[in-house]
Image (cartoon, grey):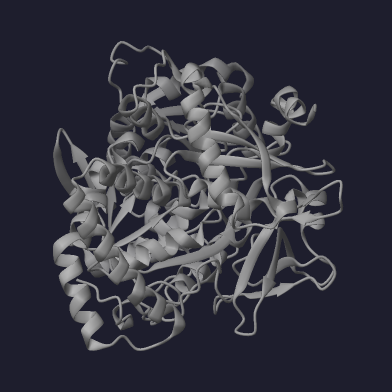
């Protein structure tokens, strides 16, 4: 059980734990070193099933052998169109082990997007999860002459399928067993022939503007970065981690799959995106990495549960979290925690805070990691008051994930920390843009030399597009995206993310987009938290028939106005929000307004809802 006032147990151990200058070399060294130990776990028919390193290796050998039997050559590209499942990792490592290039495709992508990504990456083998993803591939199959085979993980409902180009993963593994028996040394030769400078993976940007761009990462960049992560985040074979974010996103690919491959930490796969809260409580991860939306959802769940509690329960929680906040303030200020306060905190945990941690599933967590989007400083302080430090990291697809990180012994809510030990970070003196240089930085965009050149300064620094500041301790703070900074008609510079983060701290708001560039005042488009707002409506006898009518209910409008009024108190008058509009469509990852990581696309939202925005300024 972690102690909030003693953070030594979460300091990283920056020693090298695994040899290898390519991902295949690292993986096969891990198998030799850890063989019978458990690496991966998944829930199968209600029971958690473990995969040892040896079992993973057997599957990788068979999949790689199957690929080679199909004529998959070094340098060929295979794409994976699937949710986050164990087969994703098995196929990824198999592709890399036979010298191929591995590319991930979001399972929410439409057929036209699947076609574009396969064309652009010159995909010759496409792995798909199930019949739903197979339908997308078959719809665009005729437009993909380079695609030789489609491999399906889950054949449920496809037993009678008769497509010459489609094969099940089990059948591919059988081909692999036969191929490996006839050519026992081929895979070893292929893996050994992979060079650090070879292209390893493609990670396509989410494409909020224009078509997605394929960021190229070499084996040298991946292995360098994963060793660098070990100087930033404490993780070992004793740790239990969760794998639930999209594996085609750099955060889960690096921070989940490859970092766990390197450190030996166990990787637990959730059943599906909807079961994350339940699976967190079952797994009780010791190290938990997630995006702000997940942390916000957990907080709002606790806030709603408390409103349903008895007055005694509410009073006990208020006292307990108050004790935690007093300790958190001392820790953040670098001050010692007196013995009397430590004793009170022990009681507070026993009476209330341990129950809150168990409700979320973080009762075993040594620390939490947040990244991929800005997070409210108040949320970081709340988790700290529970006794679980939250460390914010910052990076992007092009930097192979984390480039800055908050150290465990110097947490500054609202800061993304100093530059990591494995890269350099600077601010452009004219624009304030954060720029990065190091071996972790990507090799460029596939097929786009001009876009690649635009992304770097003349002296070789990566332009990140994020604007920030740096304090005397070298801690960086993101103020906003360069393209998102608002300059009102009155000439006031506003960073919308600060307002948006404050709004999202409410359990009733999932996301928000502040509007106001070249306009007389600020307005906001809000996406409500359906579950929590529905609960509010039911508790207060607010009639509604569907999601749209829920957003239009006067009581719900008043509820959100109350949240905005509270947020406005924290900002100067010219920075306050004057009007708002609630999105009346229930958005999912399939909708164009959301990125694959469930963030509202600012430019698209502003364009699509231009009439509603105009109405907020009409008078």
- The answer to which image quadrant residue 478 occupies is bottom right
Above or below 150: residue 445: below
329 lies above or below 449: below
Report the residue at 60% width, 64% height from top. 197
Left or right, 507 with respect to 302, comes to right
Q: Can residue 580 be seen here? A: yes
Q: Residue at x 73, y 30 (%)?
A: 616
Vertical order, 158 against 104 (above or below):
above
Q: Quadrant of the N terminus?
A: bottom left
Q: Is residue 77 left or right of residue 12?
A: right
208, 85: nearer the viewer: 208
Q: Position of residue 563 (x, y in %)?
A: 51, 43
Between 4 and 460, the one nearer to me in the picture: 4
Residue 443 on image: x %, y %: 67, 59
Q: What x and y, as percent, mark residue 286? A: 26, 63
Dividing the image into 4 quarters, which one contains the C terminus?
A: top right
| Relative to 442, 391 lies left or right | left
Q: Is residue 240 visible?
A: no
Residue drawn at 19 percent across, 66 percent down: 349
User: Whole-percent x and y of residue 559?
Assistant: 48, 35
Q: Nearer the viewer, residue 517 or 255?
A: 517
Identified at 74% across, 26% down, the residue is 610
């Amino acid at each position: 059980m972690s102690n909030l006032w003693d953070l030594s147990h979460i300091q990283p151990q920056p020693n090298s734990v695994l040899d290898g200058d390519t991902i295949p070399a690292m993986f096969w060294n891990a198998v030799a070193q850890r063989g019978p130990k458990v690496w991966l776990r998944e829930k199968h028919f209600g029971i958690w099933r473990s995969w040892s390193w040896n079992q993973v290796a057997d599957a990788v050998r068979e999949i790689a052998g199957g690929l080679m039997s199909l004529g998959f050559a070094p340098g060929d590209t295979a794409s994976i169109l699937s949710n986050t499942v164990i087969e994703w990792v098995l196929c990824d490592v198999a592709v890399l082990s036979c010298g191929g290039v591995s590319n991930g495709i979001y399972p929410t992508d439409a057929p036209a997007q699947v076609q574009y990504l396969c064309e652009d990456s010159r995909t010759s083998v496409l792995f798909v999860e199930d019949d739903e993803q197979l339908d997308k591939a078959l719809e665009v199959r005729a437009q993909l002459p380079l695609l030789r085979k489609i491999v399906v993980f889950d054949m449920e409902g496809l037993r009678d399928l008769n497509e010459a180009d489609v094969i099940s993963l089990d059948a591919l593994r059988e081909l692999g067993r036969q191929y490996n028996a006839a050519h026992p040394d081929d895979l070893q030769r292929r893996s050994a022939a992979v060079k650090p400078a070879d292209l390893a993976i493609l990670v396509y940007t989410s494409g909020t503007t224009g078509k997605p761009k394929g960021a190229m990462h070499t084996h040298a960049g991946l292995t360098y970065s994963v060793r660098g992560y070990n100087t930033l985040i404490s993780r070992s074979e004793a740790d239990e981690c969760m794998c639930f974010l999209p594996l085609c996103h750099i955060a889960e690919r690096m921070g989940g799959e490859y970092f766990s491959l390197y450190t030996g930490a166990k990787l637990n796969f959730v059943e599906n995106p909807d079961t994350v809260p339940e699976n967190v409580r079952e797994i009780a991860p010791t190290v938990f990495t997630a995006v702000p939306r997940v942390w916000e959802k957990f907080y709002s769940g606790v806030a709603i549960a408390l409103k349903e509690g008895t007055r005694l329960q509410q009073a006990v929680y208020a006292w307990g979290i108050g004790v935690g906040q007093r300790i958190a303030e001392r820790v953040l200020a670098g001050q010692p925690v007196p013995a009397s306060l430590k004793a009170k905190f022990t009681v507070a945990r026993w009476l209330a805070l341990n129950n809150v941690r168990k409700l979320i599933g973080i009762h075993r967590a040594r620390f939490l990691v947040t990244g991929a989007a800005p997070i409210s400083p108040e949320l970081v302080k709340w988790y700290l008051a529970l006794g679980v430090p939250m460390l914010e990291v910052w990076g992007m697809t092009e930097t192979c994930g984390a480039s800055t990180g908050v150290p465990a012994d110097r947490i500054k809510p609202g800061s993304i920390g100093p530059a990591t030990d494995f890269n350099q970070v600077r601010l452009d003196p004219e624009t304030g843009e954060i720029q990065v240089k190091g071996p972790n930085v990507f090799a460029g965009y596939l097929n786009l030399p001009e876009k690649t050149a635009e992304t770097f300064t003349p002296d070789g620094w990566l332009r990140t597009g994020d604007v920030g500041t740096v304090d005397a301790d070298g801690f960086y703070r993101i103020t906003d995206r360069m393209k998102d900074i608002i300059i009102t008609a009155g000439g006031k510079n506003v960073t919308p993310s600060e307002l948006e983060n404050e709004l999202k701290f409410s359990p009733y708001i999932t996301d928000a987009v502040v509007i106001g560039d070249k306009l007389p005042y600020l307005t906001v488009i809000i996406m409500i938290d359906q579950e929590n707002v529905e609960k509010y409506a039911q508790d207060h006898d607010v009639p509604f028939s569907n999601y749209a009518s829920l957003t239009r209910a006067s009581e719900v409008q008043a509820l959100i106005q109350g949240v905005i009024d509270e947020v406005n108190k924290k900002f100067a008058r010219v920075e306050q929000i004057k009007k708002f509009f609630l999105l009346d469509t229930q958005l999912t990852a399939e909708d164009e307004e959301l990125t694959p990581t469930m963030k509202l696309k600012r430019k698209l939202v502003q364009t699509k809802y231009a009439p509603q925005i105009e109405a907020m300024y009409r008078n």
